[in-house]
């Protein structure tokens, strides 16, 4: 049982998506969209950006905000 792989990791390894997205899903920085099947950034609340008036539209890697948290 030294090299055992969890059932959740086996499920993610079988997904037909790129390795970097599988790793991001396992880390929790991205989620699978149930409706479309795409890999997406989870709903985030970002300091300095209002989701209605001034939403952040760039890539997550390029975000320079100091405070980010998951929206409930």
Image (spheres, grey):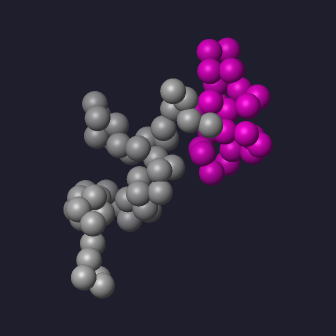
Closer to the camera, 46 or 57?
46
Image quarter of the N terminus: bottom left
Image height of 14 relative to 36, above or below: below
Q: Which residues are magenta?
A: 44-68
Magenta-drawn stretch contains 64: yes
Where 53 sits versus 45, above or below? above
Q: Residue furthest front?
A: 1
Q: Is residue 47 left or right of residue 27?
A: right
Give the image location of residue 33, x and y in percent. 34, 37
In-image side of 35 versus 20 (left or right) = left
Q: Report whether 9 appears left or right of 26.
A: left
- Give the residue drawn at x 66%, y 39%: 68
Residue 67: image location, x then y, percent: 73, 39
Q: Is residue 49 above or below residue 63?
A: above
Residue 21 in view of the camera: no
How far from the left and from the top, in percent, is residue 3?
29, 82
To which quarter of the image does residue 69 belong?
Answer: top right
Residue at (64% x, 25% y) in the render? 55
Q: Is residue 63 positioned above or below 5 on the image?
A: above
Q: Is residue 39 visible?
A: yes
Q: Residue at x 59, y 44 (%)?
A: 59
Asked where in the image residue 44 lies, by quadrant, the reply is: top right
* Dominant secondary structure of the residues highlighted in magenta in the image: loop
At 41% from the left and 53% from the top, the residue drawn is 25
Q: Is residue 19 magenta?
A: no
Which residue is most to the bottom?
2
Q: What percent of the width, then of the height, locates residue 46?
A: 67, 32
Residue in the foreground of this view, choosing between 2 and 26: 2
């Amino acid at each position: 049982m030294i090299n055992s792989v969890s059932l959740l990791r086996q499920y993610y390894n079988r997904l037909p998506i790129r390795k970097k997205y599988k790793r991001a899903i396992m880390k929790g920085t991205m989620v699978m969209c149930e409706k479309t099947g795409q890999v997406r950034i989870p709903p985030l609340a970002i300091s300095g950006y209002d989701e209605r008036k001034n939403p952040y539209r760039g890539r997550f890697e390029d975000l320079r905000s100091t405070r980010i948290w998951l929206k409930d």
